[in-house]
Image: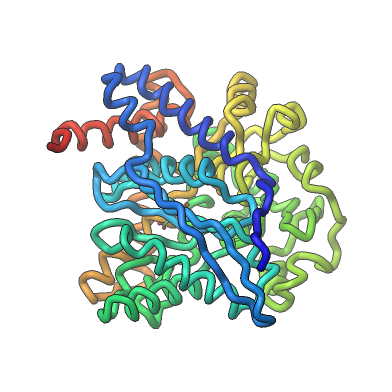
Amino acid sequence: MTLSTPAPIHPGHELRDSALRQLDSAARALNLDPGMHKFLSTPERTLIVSVPVMLEDGQLEVYTGYRVQHSTGRGPGKGGIRFHPGVTLEEVEGLAMLMTWKCAVTDLPLGGAKGGVAVDPHRLTRRQVERLTKRYTAAILPIIGPERDIPAPDVNTDESTMAWIVDTVTMMTGQHSPEVVTGKPIELGGSRGRTEATGRGVAFVTLEALKRAGRLPENTRVAVQGFGNVGSVTAKGLAEAGCKIVAVSDVSGGYAAPYGIDIPGAIEHVRRHPKRMLEGLPGLSKISNAELIAMDVDVLVPAALEGQITSANVHEVRAKIIVEGANGPITADADRKLADRGVVIMPDILANAGGVVVSYFEWVQSRAQFYWELDEVERRLEIYMRRASDLVLAKTKVYDCTPREAAFIVAVERVASAIEKRGIFP
Ligand code: GLU
């Protein structure tokens, strides 16, 4: 038997500290009661589980899994599950807190939660990932459920992962339980438009930011870091709106073309070669991740992982607008430096909220057993995204602050007010 203890490869504690610092600054602006501030700084519930997986050769591997519910003040916990070797308790805590603010800023009747397993799923077979998912689900079952906490996909998880969760809960409870997760396959009660929702929302928020900056999409050059579900759909949406996508990247590396990349072609390439990803896409020059971040573009969309723009590389960033497709891609220090330089940052809790907005629609549809057409989903998504971005941008004027500070102010005020109205139990 071997114990697997993967070393963190990205700074989860930094993400949690940034989330806490952003809460502190919103608390100051709102003159928040110190007790409430303390309550909102701490997760309501944390579960750490051991996830043993029997490999084909009879060897037992043991991974560590987490589910953190940061706040259920406005409704059941909501948030994705990620499988990544860098998952730590601190990272999951920070991400759970971001989910609370994301659901509040978009005015969903949901709280914030997150889960993860410290594992590199690319080193496992599909069968092993299925077993890992099912064992992890069984371990967190006591605290999840459609009225308690509703998981969804996140980094390295997708609709198959959600289908395995539905199966586990159904087998363990004896009740068909599709409403326990969102981001399910359509055949199992998933919502139309859920897979594309995050990227569509990121593209929408980017175009709003361009409009406010008085820039035309046709004159806008964009670099997108990450070409998974979020980055690829964002790039496609922005290209359709007329923007020139001059660089993209994924774990296989970065690729650039000064006159613009054929995004539908790149998506098709990745679909045909899922293991190679963007590698081998013709007509592009290979660049490094550091070069992509430093490219001379108008808009940079970090849509991969957290901690990508830090005090070490912030001076190299040349984009005037940054839209956070990922959660926490800019560290707190780098964020301050960029704001001082006048760079407009559309924050994660607003920019990538499209996914959880359609997750909310999916939860509603699953509970009602009544499914909407795609145009209905898209129409309602736009209403939620527009309302949230208009409110956040209006608050930047009221408080004379950045969009991030404004988004936190809106969210923290809503969560604190719900908790105050309920009163502290008992
Ligand atoms: N994982 C996504 C996020 O970070 C979606 C969460 C959800 O739909 O619950 O926003």
**Image location (x, y in percent) of residue 184:** 42, 72
Looking at the image, what colour scheme do you see?
rainbow
**On the rendered structure, is 162 left or right of 343?**
left
* Residue 233 in sight here: no
Q: Quadrant of ligand 1?
A: bottom left
Q: Give the quadrant of residue 124.
A: bottom right
Quick one: 161 or 44, which is closer to the camera? 44
**On the rendered structure, is 86 left or right of 273?**
left
Q: Give the quadrant of residue 152.
A: bottom left
Q: Which residue is located at x 64 percent, y 77 percent? A: 55
**Image location (x, y in percent) of residue 2:** 67, 64
**Image location (x, y in percent) of residue 118:** 59, 56
Q: Which residue is located at x 46 percent, y 73 percent? A: 134
Q: Which residue is located at x 44 percent, y 27 percent? A: 405
**Image location (x, y in percent) of residue 261:** 74, 59
Quick one: 356 or 48, which is closer to the camera? 48
* Residue 300 in sight here: yes
Q: Residue furthest front?
A: 1
Location of residue 413 with respect to 78 vertically, above or below: above
**On the rendered structure, is 67 left or right of 174?**
right
Q: Report the quarter where the C terminus lies.
A: top left
Location of residue 306 with respect to 368 vertically, above or below: above
Quick one: 31 or 391, which is closer to the camera? 31
Q: Report the quarter where the N terminus lies.
A: bottom right
Q: Give the quadrant of residue 342.
A: top right
Location of residue 147 with respect to 269 vertically, above or below: above
* Figure disc tally: 0
**On the rendered structure, is 299 left or right of 22?**
right
Q: Which residue is located at x 36 percent, y 54 percent? A: 78
